[in-house]
C-alpha cells in the first residue's frame, strides 16, 4: 500500500535485488537452519517493502522473487514427496489489512453475505497426510511448496494422528494440518530436553524431521487439522469448509471445532482476534495470529490461488512481544568458531515471560545501522518468541560514542582455535562444548550452556574428550547438580556412546560444516582416520562440498588443536567407525 517511491529505475532495481537477497538469506536461516536473526515483524516489513516495490515497478520483479514462492528450500531427492497441490503460505498483515482485502474480494464475487471461518494461526510445521483405504501412507512437510520432506515415520508417532480411519471415509484422502508442540508438555519437557529446543516451533520441527525414532520429542506433538485437500463427492460433496472439517473429525482426525469460529464481517473477525490476543497464553499451542478463510468451497475454487498464497484466505498477525529498556553496555560475545557477535547488555526487563538482559546485535553492520550506544533507550522484541533482539533506538544518549569504534574492531576466527579451555578461551570453549553436546552435535540431552559453564568452571571439562570421562560423583559435587541429575547426565553421555562419523564431524564445529556437509562426509568416509587422510582435492571432489569448505576441514584437522582433539578422541575409542546400530538422539 501507500504511494510509490520516486526512484530511478536502476536504483529501484538495485533495491529490489537487495531486498530479495536479504529475504532469501533470512528464509534459509528460518526454515533450514531454524535460527532466525531478525524478528518475524522485521521480516514481514522487508517482505512488505519488496511486495510494494514490485507493484510499483512491475517490470523489475524477478521471476524467482521470494514474493512469488513459498520460503522453504528445495528438499533433497531421496526424501522428496511431491504434493497433491502446492502447499502455500498465507497473505498476512500486522494489522487487519490483508483480511480487509480478502473481504473485498469475497464481496466482489458474491452478492450478499459472506461466510467466513476464523481459526488460530497455529505456529508449528505444516504437514500433508495421505490416507489410502483409511490407512496413513504418507506424511510430508511443506518444503518449497511443490514437494516436501518425507516424515511419515515420525508422524506415526504423534499422539492423535490417526493411523487408521473409521466410518465412511473416501478411498483416497489428503489432509493438511499444523504439527505443533503442546505447550504444557513443552514447558514440562524443557527441563528434560534442557532447552535443546529454543521454541515450541523448534521442538516441532526438530522432532518431526528427526531421522530416527524420537519418542521423547514426538510425544509432545499434536496435530491441528485444518484442511481437506481433495474433498470428493461421497454422499454428496461438502459445501463448506466447516462441513469438511466435521467429516474429518468423524473419521478420526483431531479437529478443534471449538477453535473454528464463524464470522460474517470484519467486526466479527476483529472480536475473534481480540479474544485470542487476550487469551493467547491460555491456548495449548503457540499461535502468531488468526487465519480467516472463505467457508464456501465453491467460492474458494472461483477465487483460486496465487503462486505464493491462496486468494481465499488471509492472516492477521499478532504484534511481537516487545519492551522498552536502556542499554548498559555494548560487548562482544564469542561463538564456537571464534566468531564475535556484538551484544547489548540492557537493564533487565521481562518480555513475554522471559527475563532479558543480553540482547544480540547480530553483526557489526547491525550495530552501525541501529547506531546503538550505552545509555540509549531501545525497543527489544522476541524473535521466534524467545530470542531477544534490539529492533529500534528510540532515545539517544548524548555524548561519547567512541566505545563503538573500538568494539567494531572484530577478530577473525582461526581454525581449531580454543578447542581446550584456557583463561583467554573460556567463552569460545564453552560455546564449542555447547555445540558439541547440542542437537546439531551429539545430542546429549540435559546438557545445555548453563550446565556446561559450571562444569568448565569446576575444572571438569578442559577439552571435548573430557565429556566422556565425567563421573557422576564429580558432577554431583558441582553447584547446581545433585546425585540424580549427575547420574542422568552420565547416562545421557553413555547413550551417545561412540557416535557415527557424521555426528562427530557435525559436533566438532568446523566453520562451514553443518549437518548436511557432515552427512556427506559420513557417507563418503568410513572412519575419522579416512577423513583425515583425504586432501583438499579429494574433499572438494565430493558432491556438495566446495573448495572453501574443503579448505576449512583441512585446516581444522591440521591445526594443533585439531590434531590433539583427534588423538584424545581416538584414545577413548571414538573413531567414527560404524558400530552396530546407531545411537538414538
Ligand atoms: N524471522 C525470520 O527471519 C523469518 C524468515 C522467514 C519467515 N518468517 C516468518 O514466517 C512467515 C512466513 O512463513 P510461512 O510461509 O510459513 O507463512 P505463515 O506461517 O505466515 O502462514 C502460512 C502457514 O500458516 C499455517 N497455518 C497455521 N494455522 C493455520 C490455520 N488454522 N489454517 C491454515 N493455515 C494455518 C499453515 O501451515 C500455512 O502454511 C513470515 O511472515 C514470518 O513471520 C520469519
Ligand atoms: Zn544476517
Image: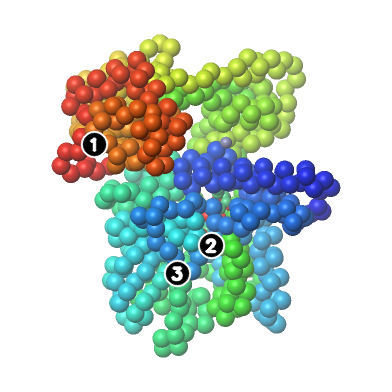
Question: Within 8 Å: ligand 2 and the Cβ of disc 1?
Answer: no
Rendered residue at 39%/58% (across/down): 80
- View quadrant of ligand 2: top right
Placement of 453 over or under 167, stated as above or below = above
Viewer can see residue 455 = no
Q: Are marks 3 and 1 in contact (CB under 8 Å)?
A: no
Most extreme residue toward the bottom is 235
**Residue 12 drawn above or below residue 532:** below
Quadrant of res 165: bottom left
Identify the mark at residue 526; answer none if there is no mark.
Answer: 1
Q: Which mark is residue 84?
A: 3
- Quadrant containing the N terminus in the rendered view: bottom right
Q: Local crowd at mark 2 within 10 Å, few (<14), some, or many (≥20)?
A: many
Secondary-structure class at tag 1: loop
Label 3 to label 2: alpha-carbon separation: 12 Å
In the picture of the structure, the residue carrying the numbered disc 2 is 88
Q: Identify the mark nearer the N-term, 1 or 2.
A: 2
Q: Is mark 2 within 8 Å of ligand 1?
A: yes
Closer to the eye: label 3 or 1: 1
Mark 1 touching mark 2, by CB under 8 A?
Answer: no
In depth, the one of 269 and 441 nearer the eye is 441
Residue depicted at x 34% and y 17%: 561
Amino acid at each position: 500500500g501507500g504511494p510509490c517511491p520516486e526512484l530511478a529505475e536502476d536504483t529501484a532495481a538495485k533495491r529490489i535485488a537487495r531486498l530479495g537477497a536479504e529475504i532469501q538469506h533470512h528464509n534459509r536461516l528460518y526454515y533450514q537452519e531454524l535460527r532466525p536473526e531478525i524478528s518475524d515483524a522485521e521480516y514481514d516489513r522487508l517482505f512488505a517493502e519488496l511486495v510494494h516495490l514490485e507493484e510499483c515497478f512491475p517490470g523489475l520483479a524477478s521471476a524467482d522473487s521470494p514474493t512469488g514462492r513459498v520460503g522453504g528450500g528445495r528438499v533433497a531427492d531421496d526424501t522428496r514427496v511431491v504434493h497433491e497441490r502446492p502447499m502455500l503460505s498465507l497473505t498476512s498483515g500486522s494489522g487487519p489489512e490483508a483480511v480487509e482485502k480478502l473481504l473485498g474480494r469475497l464481496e466482489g464475487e458474491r452478492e450478499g453475505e459472506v461466510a467466513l471461518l476464523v481459526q488460530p494461526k497455529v505456529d508449528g510445521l505444516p504437514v500433508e497426510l495421505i490416507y489410502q483405504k483409511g490407512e496413513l501412507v504418507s506424511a510430508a512437510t511443506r518444503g518449497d511448496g511443490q514437494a516436501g520432506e518425507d516424515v511419515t515415520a515420525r508422524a506415526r508417532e504423534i499422539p492423535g494422528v490417526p493411523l487408521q480411519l473409521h466410518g465412511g471415509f473416501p478411498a483416497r484422502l489428503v489432509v493438511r494440518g499444523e504439527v505443533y508442540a503442546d505447550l504444557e508438555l513443552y514447558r514440562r519437557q524443557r527441563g528434560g530436553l534442557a532447552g535443546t529446543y529454543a521454541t515450541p516451533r523448534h521442538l516441532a520441527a526438530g522432532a518431526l524431521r528427526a531421522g530416527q525414532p524420537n519418542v521423547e520429542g514426538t510425544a509432545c506433538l499434536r496435530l491441528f487439522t485444518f484442511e481437506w485437500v481433495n474433498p470428493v463427492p461421497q454422499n454428496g460433496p461438502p459445501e463448506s469448509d466447516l462441513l469438511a472439517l466435521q467429516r474429518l473429525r468423524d473419521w478420526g482426525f483431531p479437529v478443534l471445532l471449538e477453535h473454528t469460529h464463524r464470522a460474517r464481517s470484519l467486526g466479527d473477525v476483529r472480536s475473534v482476534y481480540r479474544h485470542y490476543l487476550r487469551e493467547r497464553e491460555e491456548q495449548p499451542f503457540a499461535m502468531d495470529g488468526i487465519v480467516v478463510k472463505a467457508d464456501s468451497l465453491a467460492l474458494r475454487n472461483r477465487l483460486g490461488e496465487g503462486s505464493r498464497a491462496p486468494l481465499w484466505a488471509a492472516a492477521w498477525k499478532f504484534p511481537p512481544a516487545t519492551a522498552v529498556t536502556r542499554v548498559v553496555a555494548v560487548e562482544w560475545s564469542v561463538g564456537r568458531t571464534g566468531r564475535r557477535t556484538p551484544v547489548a547488555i540492557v537493564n533487565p526487563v521481562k518480555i513475554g515471560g522471559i527475563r532479558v538482559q543480553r540482547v544480540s546485535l547480530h553483526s557489526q553492520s547491525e550495530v552501525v545501522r541501529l547506531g546503538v550506544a550505552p545509555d540509549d533507550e531501545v525497543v527489544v522484541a522476541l524473535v521466534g518468541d524467545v530470542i531477544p533482539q534490539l529492533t529500534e533506538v528510540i532515545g539517544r544518549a548524548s555524548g561519547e560514542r567512541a566505545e563503538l569504534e573500538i568494539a567494531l574492531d572484530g577478530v577473525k576466527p582461526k581454525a581449531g582455535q580454543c578447542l581446550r579451555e584456557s583463561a583467554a578461551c573460556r567463552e569460545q570453549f564453552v560455546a564449542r562444548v555447547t555445540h558439541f553436546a547440542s542437537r546439531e552435535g551429539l545430542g546429549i540431552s540435559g546438557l545445555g550452556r548453563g550446565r556446561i559453564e559450571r562444569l568448565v568452571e569446576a575444572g571438569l571439562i578442559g577439552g571435548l574428550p573430557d565429556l566422556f570421562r565425567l563421573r557422576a560423583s564429580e558432577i554431583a559435587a558441582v553447584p547446581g547438580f545433585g546425585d540424580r541429575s549427575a547420574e542422568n547426565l552420565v547416562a545421557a553421555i553413555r547413550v551417545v556412546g561412540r557416535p557415527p562419523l557424521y555426528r562427530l564431524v557435525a559436533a566438532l564445529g568446523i566453520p562451514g560444516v553443518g549437518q548436511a556437509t557432515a552427512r556427506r562426509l559420513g557417507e563418503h568416509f568410513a572412519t575419522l582416520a579416512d577423513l583425515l587422510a583425504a586432501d583438499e582435492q579429494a574433499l572438494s571432489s565430493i558432491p556438495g562440498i566446495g573448495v572453501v569448505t574443503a579448505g576449512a576441514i583441512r585446516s581444522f584437522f591440521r591445526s594443533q588443536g585439531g590434531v590433539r582433539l583427534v588423538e584424545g578422541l581416538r584414545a577413548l575409542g571414538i573413531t567414527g567407525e560404524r558400530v552396530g546400530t546407531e545411537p538414538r538422539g
